[in-house]
């Protein structure tokens, strides 16, 4: 395991989502995963997807239950809200403290980021309260011999595809913020800190894009397929 | 930016991955899935919103009857021609497909063709999200960032408050940005307003 991480440091942001921390010793990937209750194949699939720019989701991620995917999505959200966002927020605040910016500029950036966090949390809670429980219920119902008629009725009027359409892109605003810093604000004295903020924003943006890909390319198509199967089975045309 | 969904059906791993790497650099392209030398892509098409299929000559020849019986499919097809010119008898002429690219195409020509296709596709299927702001909406956005309330904007532009709210909803849904601070930063980086003109009125 240590060699995998050492040679692919981009994997670091992925580790907390599986409750893994460096300090692996000589344990293999499988040993580390097993001792943390992580499905090794799932970890490898996600790690590959994360590293490989040419990765196109294939059969790999379809082998896992929707339940596993949903858990991964929730722990990714947790990583964003508990690790990534607070870390970049505190750096931005420090950058603002130490800068020669006008009061207006400081207020703009600070307000922007706190609004951004609010929108971000609203987005996540919408997903966790409505979408993900629906996915889990769908998988559960589809395994039953006689699914709940009320659920089938609901299926006739609702589809996960609606969610796809309102799926906001959370990374766009981060790009605007980077652009603001690079182009429109005066230079910062603390170069190191300024670079860290830009790097963090860029890492987070890439992460959000990848995460949206997992949702859009893997989760949603699979859910849509399951919806269709269950409907055909329960109320054949 | 509107995203178009692609699938690739190309036997050669090398060519397929090469194409993935080129397409990934073109804005607005999303590769949903890639297929090698099998026909399972047909089943995939039924359940997924695919806009374009890039298919290799040999894959096209193998399933030409499927393509023949499905004009909707030909419209989505971009044929990747190689050096095997002759397919099975009765295969659809390459001119019936939406476009074709050649294995020996150079980078610029390839990018140009794909971008042209994306442009045509977007025109045929306009998407609210990717549409640019109208001049009216830009005016309203500038006033919002300048700290005016909906009522003040309505008075200034001789509109009803209701109309202003509708415009603001449309602006947010086009840009995918809800907060005023987010809109303000968008307006700054798109040169709609300068930082000096910004007024972050907390009472709105």
Image (tube, coloured by chain):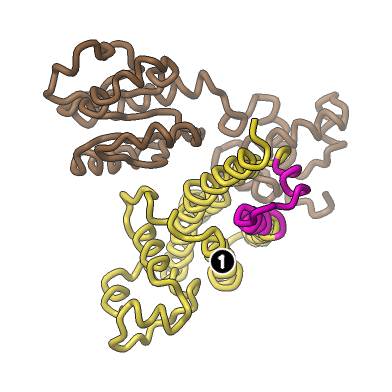
Chain colours: A yellow, B brown
Residue A89, compared with residue A162, is above or below; it is below
Query: Is residue A146 within the magenta segment?
Result: yes
Q: Please give the range of residues in magenta.
A: A129-155
Is A85 in front, or is A151? A151
The disc numbered 1 marks a residue on which chain?
A
The structure residue drawn at horizontal position 34% and vertical position 51%, both measured from the top left corner, is A55
Residue situated furthest front in the rendering:
A145
Return the residue at label 1. Answer: A71
The structure residue drawn at horizontal position 43% and vertical position 37%, both measured from the top left corner, is B44
A81 left or right of B137 in image: left
Is B106 in front, or is A39? A39
- Residue A103 in sight from this viewpoint: no
Residue A23: image quadrant is: bottom left
Residue A143: image quadrant is: bottom right
A208 left or right of B76 in image: right
Residue B85, compared with residue B195, is above or below; it is above
């Amino acid at each position: 395991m240590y060699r995998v991480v050492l040679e692919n440091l981009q994997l670091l942001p992925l580790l907390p989502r599986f409750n893994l921390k460096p300090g692996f010793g000589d344990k293999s990937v499988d040993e580390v995963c097993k001792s943390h209750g992580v499905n090794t194949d799932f970890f490898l699939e996600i790690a590959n997807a994360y590293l490989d720019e040419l990765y196109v989701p294939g059969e790999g991620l379809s082998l896992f239950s929707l339940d596993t995917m949903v858990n991964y999505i929730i722990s990714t959200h947790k990583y964003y809200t508990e690790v990534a966002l607070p870390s970049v927020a505190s750096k931005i605040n420090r950058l603002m403290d130490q800068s020669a910016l006008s009061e207006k500029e400081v207020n703009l950036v600070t307000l922007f980021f706190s609004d951004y966090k609010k929108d971000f949390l609203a987005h996540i809670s919408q997903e966790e309260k409505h979408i993900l429980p629906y996915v889990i219920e769908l998988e559960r119902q589809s395994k039953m011999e006689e699914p709940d008629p009320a659920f089938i009725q609901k299926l006739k009027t609702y589809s996960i595809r609606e969610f796809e359409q309102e799926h906001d892109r959370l990374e766009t605003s981060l790009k605007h913020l980077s652009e603001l810093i690079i182009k429109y604000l005066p230079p910062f004295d603390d170069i190191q800190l300024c670079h860290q903020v830009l790097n963090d924003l860029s890492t987070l943006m890439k992460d959000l894009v990848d995460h949206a890909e997992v949702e859009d390319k893997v989760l949603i198509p699979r859910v849509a397929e399951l919806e269709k199967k269950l409907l055909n089975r329960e109320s054949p045309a | 930016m509107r995203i178009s969904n692609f699938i690739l059906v190309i036997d050669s791993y090398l060519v397929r991955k090469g194409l993935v790497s080129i397409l990934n650099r073109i804005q607005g392209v999303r590769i949903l899935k890639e297929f090698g030398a099998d026909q399972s892509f047909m089943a995939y098409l039924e359940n997924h919103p695919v806009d374009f299929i890039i298919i290799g000559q040999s894959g096209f020849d193998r399933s030409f009857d499927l393509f023949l019986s499905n004009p909707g499919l030909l419209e989505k097809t971009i044929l990747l021609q190689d050096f095997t010119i002759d397919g099975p008898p009765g295969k659809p002429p390459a001119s019936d497909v939406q476009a074709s690219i050649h294995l020996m195409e150079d980078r610029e020509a390839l990018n140009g063709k794909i971008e042209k296709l994306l442009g045509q596709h977007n025109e045929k299927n306009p998407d609210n999200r990717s549409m640019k702001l109208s001049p009216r909406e830009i005016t309203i956005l500038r006033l919002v960032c300048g700290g005016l309330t909906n009522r003040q904007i309505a008075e200034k532009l001789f509109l009803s408050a209701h109309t202003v709210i509708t415009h603001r909803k449309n602006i947010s849904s086009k840009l995918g940005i809800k907060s005023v601070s987010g809109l303000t930063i968008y307006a700054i980086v798109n040169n709609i307003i300068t930082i000096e003109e910004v007024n972050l009125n907390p009472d709105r």
